[in-house]
Image (tube, rainbow, N blue to C red):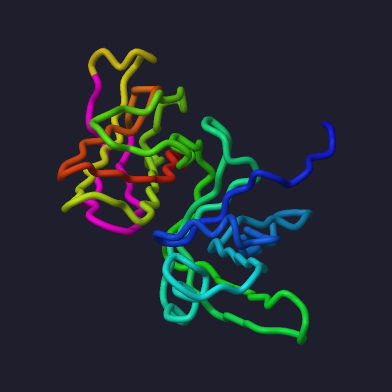
Amino acid sequence: MAAFILKDGKFVLNGYDLSGFVKSMDLSLSTAEIDVTTIDQDSIKKIGGLEDLSISAEGFFEAGVDKPDELFGSNLGSNVNFAVAADNGKGNSAYFGGGLETSYSIFGAVGEAAPFQFNGSGTETKHVKGTIEDPGTTAITANANTTGFELGAVTSDQKLYAAIFVFTPSGTSPTLDVKVQSDDNSSFTSATDRITFTQATGKTSEIKTADGAITDTHYRFNYTVGGSTPNFTLFGIIGKR
């Protein structure tokens, strides 16, 4: 496998796309090692315990609307929804979940670009490796569906996960209703609603699930917009685990 150069990445928290401010990011996933070795065994036996994660980012400080300080400066000790991707393209992989903002550091040496550093740790929301259904590069101005991808069936011991990150919309009283739909074919000839998100009227984020089993193999987002000249930008991911 060839070496991978990190570029065109994505870093979003809540309703903020911070990709243009972040210079480095790190996501660390872990699980506790539980020793379940019994006296009738001749080797150590371990199983995975509780999962945890840590997420961090470093970048360039800016204050103002939709800037890092607006988010980090007021959310210390609060839960945030996050998504990170090494390559922000439709159909590429991304990780998403929930985290607790644990630290926020700003400022630096005189004459240098003012930095920030963010750190977060896991909460009860599990992390999921999913597929980018909407990379947030095309505005949503009318009712539409994403192309959709084949992600496979969801077994009875799995859940379907989806995350949306809605950035600041424009228009008069804009509304956006988002659903996750599934089908057994790429044309979605008989699409079934699986997840319905809370209607978005401004900057927001949400992670929702649907229980398996789901025998359908293809999944997409369905968008319904309202208001006068609505214009939304959304980063959306679908996965299962």
Quadrant position of residue 134 = top left
Is 68 in front, or is 31?
Answer: 68
Query: Residue 82's spot in the image, x, y percent?
Result: 48, 58
Q: Is residue 174 magenta?
A: no
239 relative position to 45: left or right: left
208 relative position to 26: left or right: left
- The residue positioned 58% from the left and 80% from the top of the image is 104
Quadrant position of residue 80 = bottom left
Q: Is residue 195 above or below residue 20?
A: above
Q: Is residue 197 magenta?
A: yes
Query: Residue 131's spot in the image, x, y percent?
Result: 50, 36
- The residue positioned 54% from the left and 79% from the top of the image is 102
Q: Which residues are magenta?
A: 191-212
Is 8 in front, or is 109?
Answer: 109
Q: Is residue 216 above or below residue 83?
A: above
- The residue positioned 27% from the left and 57% from the top of the image is 202
Is 18 in front, or is 103?
Answer: 18
Query: Residue 160's spot in the image, x, y percent?
Result: 37, 40
**Quarter in which the N terminus is drawn:** top right
Figure label count: 0
Query: Residue 238's spot in the image, x, y percent?
Result: 43, 39
Q: Residue furthest right?
A: 2
201 relative position to 111: left or right: left
